[in-house]
Amino acid sequence: MLGNSDVALEHLAAARSIYDDLGRPTANVRTCAPIEAQVARLMGDSERALAILQDSCATLGEMQNWNHFGTQAARLGDLLCDLDREAEAHGWLESGESHALGDDLDAQIELRALRARVLAREGNHASAEEAVREAVALADETDAVNQQAAVQLSLADVLRLADRATEALEALTCARLLYERKENAAAAARLGMAAAAA
């Protein structure tokens, strides 16, 4: 979160090694893979993040580990939306929704946010906004500040696609403030660069 990707990757390599030494390789898929993917995204390496999440979701599916599958499928779909690969994102949305556990709050939040982004790209703006507002409300009930910020980014995307630029900017500002509150300098900086390029 502090923007030092080299140190982050060193820590992740050490964590992977410890899990391997403990004979728990599947823990790498559940724990390290989503963090590695997030680090790659923050570094601007979307293709690496995509490969990590695709591999992780495939492995979780083979293991029938539905406790973690829904959240990671939603994150994979979210990344695919960023890459303008909507059909693939829709496929992961459906897969995530069909396997996510009803009481898995992380999955329910992230799948609603992804559904909103997919619907917005299909031109279904009212349903997209309804889905993302549900995600925002659920996230706001938690203390997961990074997730709250990510959902605000989904809200901004939905509003942007509905040609509501002022409201989209408000959601982006909210996301940036949340990242700053969490001291997630890497995400805040990346958001600032994206806003400057827009």
Image (cartoon, helix red, strand yellow):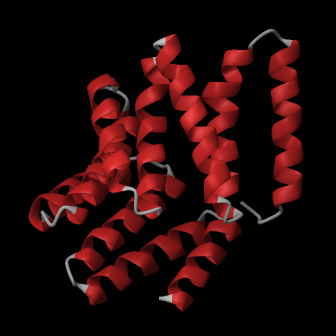
Q: Position of residue 167 (x, y in %)?
A: 27, 83
Q: Nearer the viewer, residue 155 or 37?
A: 37
**Residue 17 picture quarter:** top right
Q: Which of 83 and 23 is in front in this view?
A: 83
Q: Where is residue 112 in the image (x, y as percent from the top left)?
A: 28, 47
Residue at 58%, 30% (x, y): give it: 56
Given the current orientation, which residue lies at the most extreme top position?
A: 23
Residue 48 visible? The answer is yes
Using residue 48 as the reference point, say whether residue 87 is left or right of it: left
Using residue 51 as the reference point, say whether residue 154 is left or right of it: left
For the N terminus, the image quarter is bottom right
Residue at 15%, 67% (x, y): give it: 123
Using residue 105 as the reference point, say whether residue 123 is left or right of it: left
Using residue 70 as the reference point, say whether residue 117 is left or right of it: left
62, above or below 138, in the image:
above
Residue at 44%, 53% (x, y): give it: 80
